[in-house]
Image (cartoon, rainbow, N blue to C red):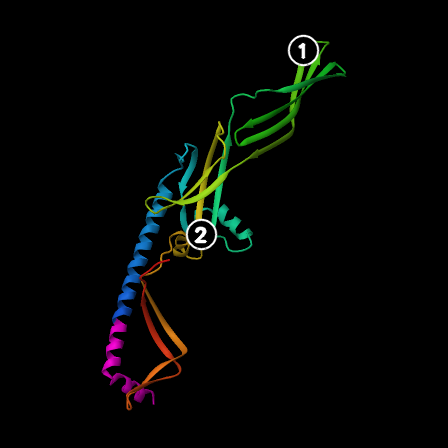
Amino acid sequence: MILTFLKNILSNSLIRTVLLIAMIFLLFSLYVKQCEDNTTLKKIYQQNQAALLDSLFVVKNKIGELSYEKYTLITDIENLKNINKDLYNETQKISGKVKEISEYNIKYEIDEIKKLVSEIKIKQYDKGTINTDVWKNNINDGSFNANIEGYTDAYLDTINCKISKMETYMSSFKYSLDLISYTKIDKDGLIVSGVKTPKETKGLSLNLKSYEVDDKIKDAWDKYNKKSSLFSVTLGPYVGYGLSQDKFNNYWFSNFQIGIGLQIGIKIFNF
């Protein structure tokens, strides 16, 4: 029955022509798809080469503010274990599927502490007095704000006229730092991760490592670079209502239709 059905289909010259055209389009679509995959692998190689060879670079944005940027490494989640085990372990602690993970190293240095407020307290001990200098300092430097409090004990030996020892303690240290992170595509189509402070902060330096991760490397890349293919191929069942031709009486009629079909389309417009 199936062989008879196939024989009747193949005996029709119109159907043979349609199938031949469909096969040509299918092979051409597969060729285009393979070319697109090869191009994607080449771009991922270029991306990771830039990420591994280049260090952090400092750039100015449109209004002259400094930003710290680095090329993002594209990897799958299992390979991340070999590249950065600490960040891989962090992904295992997070509920849900991790798509991007970054690590920031922040360093803040100042040459001197200004506006140091202190208060001297004196109390006695067996050999003399203890002078306690209670001090605190507020730092407001751009996006970095800190409050430091502590005290220093100076043991004055009044019998031997000397300072026997000094001890400094930090009783409180509170700070805040505002950061803005972003991801962009540069002029070469490569993924760049960046971080900056909303306000200029002197003495602040930043470093970062950023990874796009997924179950497959290509999926991680497609998150930012997914492009729709020019051709689409669909094979599967269809159900509908349409027109059919009665070949014997040479007229058209509407009827319910069900079957299996191959559909090949060309995308003309991209929205």
Q: On residue 224, which mark appears?
A: none
Identify which amino acid the numbered label 2 is placed on: Val
Q: Note whether 69 is above or below 9 in the view shown.
A: above
Residue at figure coordinates x 70%, y 13% from the top left: 156
Which residue does the numbered mark 2 point to in the structure image?
213
Image quadrant of residue 78? bottom left
Q: Secondary structure at mark 2?
A: strand
- Dot 2 alpha-carbon crowd within 10 angstroms: few under 14, some 14 to 19, many 20 or more: many
Q: Position of residue 265 (x, y in %)?
A: 32, 67
Which residue does the numbered mark 1 point to in the structure image?
162
Quadrant where the N terminus lies? bottom left
On whether residue 88 falls in the magenta region, the answer is no
- Label 2 and label 1: CA atoms lie apart by 63 Å
Q: Position of residue 90 (x, y in %)?
A: 53, 48
On whether residue 4 falls in the magenta region, the answer is yes
Residues in magenta, as a range = 1-23
